[in-house]
Image (cartoon, grey):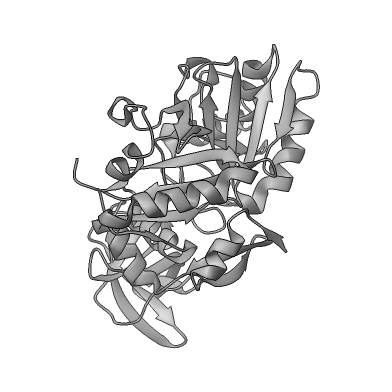
Amino acid sequence: MRETALKSRHSDLGARLVDFAGWQMPVQYTGILEEAAHVRRYAGLFDLGHMGRVRVRGPQAEAFLQRLQTNDAAKIPAGAIRYALILDADGLTQDDILIYRHPVADEFFLVINAGNTARDLAIMHDTAKGFDVTLLDQTDELGMFAIQGPASQAITQQLTDFDLSSLRYYNWAVTHIAGVAVELSRTGYTGEDGFEVYAPQARTAELWDAFLEAGADHQLRATGLGARDTLRLEAGMPLYGHEIDETTNPLEAGLEFGVKFTHDFTGRTALEQIRQAGGPARRLVGLTTESRRVPRQGYPVSIDGRDVGAILSGAISPTLGRNIATTYLPTELAVSGTPVEFRIRQASEPATVHDLPFYKRPR
């Protein structure tokens, strides 16, 4: 099992470590619900060293990316970041990724899901044939962690001379944090304001310690992947293997914002055919329930006794004070307020269709 540069820090803090996509990662330190609520109120520090990180360079880097993924790489300004998907020829999702256009150098940077890193790299190398492009897997070279929550900017500003108020959401910069050269993006996977830090592996633990020290007066805590999963679900953000996978397409998942029909990406024809046929046959929706039973992945979802879907993700929401979930429903039934049921063994529990996201932070 692989370990990130922060594994010893997690052990010292008493984290419960689990196998996540072949990496030993902290699922929680105290409790998932407590940690999630704390991030919404204050701030949390997350180890993201398991994510894949790939540098894309060369004269045809942009042309390569236009073929590889769904967003329009040609329209990404320097220093900006875009959400995108890698599809197969049938328009089915192989992964969702972030594309960074470097603020200074003539290159791109991709962040990909830990469980899909090997497959994504294989797809990238196959797609790169015929393009003058270099792919550099930096997963083992760069550490990665995030600070998320309302206090994120105040904490991070103590560690840098860079004016963080000038860094807009989904933008990144090359700067120094606590004297270490880093790449810093205003991104995250919690629905809160925050930053993701990319630094040399050998300096990552040092930076982690600096953040915890600087954030002590702001209630900053190390936070596990369990809370991150709850937070992203509240924010309506998809997770590969749950809301999206190789059986789903981005149109039915509500991810049209990451698809631009301006270039010849793999899977474009299949998506155009879906649009020409009137749109997807099903849609991703949220569910809320007053039941004390938590809807979990795989539980059947029914309407009037007829199975119409299955739970994709489910959790206790500390922010909403009720249980929440996601599912796909036939398009004609994917309407907010529609009553449904989810089934645990032979018992059916009531739920209601809810538009995504469940939570949006105050702006």
Q: Where residue 127 sits in the image (x, y, percent)?
A: 74, 28
Q: Where residue 345 sits in the image (x, y, percent)?
A: 47, 86
Residue at x 32% of width, y 45% of height: 155
Most extreme residue toward the bottom, as rendered?
346
Q: Does residue 156 appear anywhere in the picture? A: yes
Q: Judge whether 241 appears above or below 345 on screen.
A: above
Q: Where residue 280 sits in the image (x, y, percent)?
A: 46, 43
Nearest the eye: 8 or 113: 8
Q: Where residue 38 sits in the image (x, y, percent)?
A: 29, 63
Q: Is 44 left, or right, of 114 in this rendering?
A: left
> Where, by quadrant of the figure, is residue 295 drawn?
bottom left
Nearest the eye: 66 or 193: 193
Residue at x 74% of width, y 23% of height: 134
Residue at x 72% of width, y 64% of height: 1
| Marker count (numbered) | 0
Q: Does residue 189 appear anywhere in the picture? A: no
State which quarter of the image contains the C terminus: top left
> Where, by quadrant of the figure, is residue 308 drawn?
bottom left
> Where, by quadrant of the figure, is residue 4 drawn?
bottom right
Q: Judge whether 174 appears above or below 277 on screen.
A: above
Residue at x 46% of width, y 70% of height: 28
Most extreme residue toward the top, as rendered?
59
